[in-house]
Amino acid sequence: MKVIKVKNYDELSKVAASIIAAQVINNPQSVLGLATGSTPIGAYKNLVCAYNDGLLDFSNVKSINLDEYCGLSGENDQSYRYFMNDNLFNHVNIDKNNTFVPDGTAEDSEAECERYEALCESLGYADLQLLGIGHNGHIGFNEPASAFAAKTHCVKLQESTINANSRLFEKKEDVPTSAFTMGIGTILKAKKILLIGGADKKEIIEKAIYGDVTPEVPASALQLHKDVTVIYVAE
Ligand code: GLP
């Protein structure tokens, strides 16, 4: 595991974007595993700048996103599909038909999980998977649990996650209570993993990367992967 400590969010965003940019330059047909949340926004902004400067070409890139709220369609501005369009896809030359996010409106959740996992498998999983982290150690929406989930599944969100994410909604009652997420197994199938966290994530990141490997801290599973880079703000 490679650990890079940075001074602030700006540096975090620049270093993360440069790693993603290098991936796209080295393999223009990369499958990028992408993440939502506040943390990656700065990295996406830097990627858009690099694209505008003519340094990046996303025309042959494909993407698979980690997760999506159950019940929200892509037009809903709180959905992760909307987030991805708004923060990245609308600003670069990626073909949206090559960008994949679980379908939050799927009625048969089991079928949707199977479809999404099969899709990830058919693309060979992510060449580079970007991850944020929740304060409770969740990655994607893999909440602390008694076992690591192998595949894409539907999860009931923990109260702490609902509270944390409610800042982005008008009221707490609007936050969906369940979500589709890649499993820990799906995430670990990525060839490379890049975990990023701001200053408020220092404690949980250090617990995840230096503590016991346990499903109680889902991100600790990253210790089992052979090519992980962690960048976090630590003064
Ligand atoms: C959500 C997402 C995660 C993300 C986490 C942290 O719960 N499902 O993928 O890592 O939030 O978000 P933030 O970066 O806003 O702290």
Image (cartoon, grey):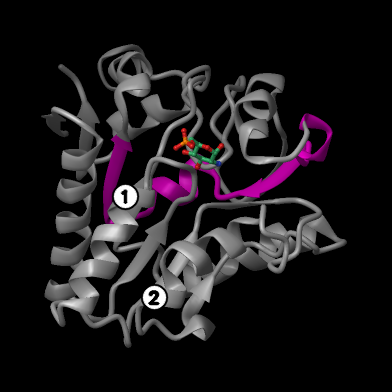
Give me the disc on residue 174.
none
Label 1: few (<14), some (14–19) or many (≥20) C-alpha neighbours in 10 Å: some
Q: Which residue is painted at 70% across and 65% down in the image?
A: 103
- Judge left or right: residue 226 versus residue 123: left
Q: Which residue is painted at 27% across and 45% down in the image?
A: 194
Quadrant the C terminus occupies: top left
Q: Which residue is painted at 55% across and 43% down in the image?
A: 150
Q: Which residue is painted at 31% across and 49% down in the image?
A: 42
Q: Which residue is mark 2?
A: 91
Q: Amino acid at mark 2?
A: His
Residue 49, quarter of the rendered image: bottom left
- Judge left or right: residue 89 versus residue 224: right
The span picked out in magenta is 172-196
- Judge left or right: residue 168 versus residue 22: right
Q: In the image, residue 46 lies at what x, y percent?
A: 24, 59
Q: In the image, residue 93 lies at what x, y percent?
A: 35, 84
What is the spatial separation of the Cα atoms under label 2 and label 1, in whole angstroms? 14 Å
Q: Which residue is mark 1?
A: 42
Q: Amino acid at mark 1?
A: Gly
The residue most toward the front is 170
